[in-house]
Amino acid sequence: MKTLRDVQIGETVKVVKLHGEGAVKRRIMDMGITRNVEVYVRKVAPLGDPIEVTVRGYELSIRKADAEMVEVQ
């Protein structure tokens, strides 16, 4: 299982599934990260947290812990 955290800079991936429950999953979905959407990884901070991605035409910073809950291909 490959997660959003494992994606290299400059790579575009497609979201397969969201893990997590309740408020955490809802927050990820509210940011626009839903099934079948393409996510482009722009930057990763020096210590790996946060990760800057482009989703649905806008830029978003996501924590490493939240990125682990997003399964991609």
Image: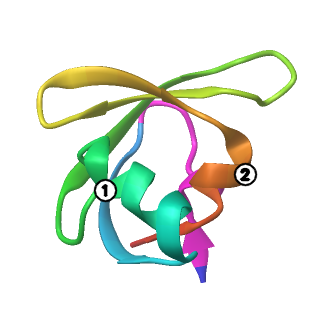
* Mark whose residue sits in front, 1 or 2: 1
- Numbered label tally: 2
Secondary structure state at the residue bearing disc 2: helix
Q: Which residues are magenta?
A: 2-10
Colour treatment of the image: rainbow
**Which amino acid, by three-letter code, is at mark 2?**
Ala
Q: Earlier in the sequence, mark 1 or mark 2?
A: 1
> Is residue 5 placed above or below 49 in the rendered structure?
below
> Is residue 24 placed above or below 2 in the rendered structure?
above
Residue with the most extreme right position: 47
Secondary structure state at the residue bearing disc 1: helix
The residue sitting at 20% across, 22% down in the picture is 58
In this rendered view, identify the residue nearer to me: 68 or 27. 27
Residue 37 within the magenta-colored segment of the rendering: no
The residue sitting at 75% across, 28% down in the picture is 49
Which numbered marker is on residue 29? Answer: 1
Q: Which residue is mark 2?
A: 65
> Is residue 58 placed above or below 15 in the rendered structure?
above
Is 32 placed left or right of 3 in the picture?
A: left
The residue sitting at 54% across, 55% down in the picture is 4
